[in-house]
Image: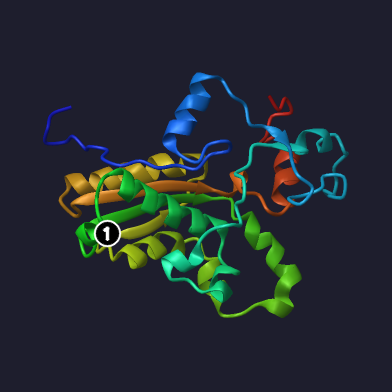
Amino acid sequence: MDNDNAVAIVGIACRFPGADDADEFSKNLEEGECFIDEVPKRRWDSNKADVRDSDESWKDCSKYAALIDEHDKWDNKFFGISDSEAAWMNPQHCLALEVTHSAIENAGITLDQIKGTKTGVFIGAMNDDVLLGLPSSRHELNNFVVTGMTPSITSNRISYHFDLRGPSMTLDTACSSALVAVHLGCQSIRSGNINSLQSNMTNNNVVCVFTDKYPISMKFKKIKRKVR
């Protein structure tokens, strides 16, 4: 690739099952670590779940998953978000804010340096299983649900908090969401629309708070029966 089209990666951060940063993730890959384990009952109990018009063959496999630890714990006050608002935020929003801050630190860029810049935010986000729990909480709903559970706000929160002035969009193209987000971000840099790019992927499959979507995925064979 010629220098005119080259895009440099200057900062990186991640959160994966069994890894809180890129170094730990790389080490896990090198050592062939597997973090698929039995799902804690506090996440969901497959024995109590029910999928209409299906036998129970999916239940053995639905007991296992690779999940991010402590998905519901984060320092909301650090990002200027009240406890009341944080209680109604999709964990995808929280992870996106945390990982973005870590990526900026990793790049050696100060918040003052990036503030007000023509930086675009392109987020790939899929699987909003947190929304499935809202019907049972209707008596508790408030105004924060509108912004807290809306996928498009994932990227907008980043742009707002860090005062980034480029395009801000959340994309859902299923399993290709992250690749499409990076592709569109690189195109935007090359076209001169933005000077820098913040792109990441959030997937509630590794967060998974509610049980409904996971067994349904098993039923339609989206998840392999061989768990390891």
Q: Residue furthest top?
A: 31
Q: Is residue 40 above or below residue 4?
A: below
Amino acid at dot 1: Leu
Q: Residue 107's spot in the image, x, y percent?
A: 27, 44
Q: Which residue is mark 1?
A: 111
Which residue appears at 35% of the width and 67% of the height?
160
Q: Give the quarter of the figure containing the C terminus.
A: top right
Say which residue appears at 28% left-offset and 55% top-offset: 120
Say whether residue 12 is left or right of residue 226: left
Question: Left of 40 or right of it: where is 148?
Answer: left
- How many numbered dots are placed on residues in this image? 1
Whole-percent x, y for residue 132 in the image: 69, 60
| Residue 223 versus residue 45 in the image, above or below | above
Q: Residue at x 50, y 71 (%)?
A: 147
x and y percent of residue 54 in the render?
Answer: 85, 42
Report helix, strand or loop for mark 1.
helix
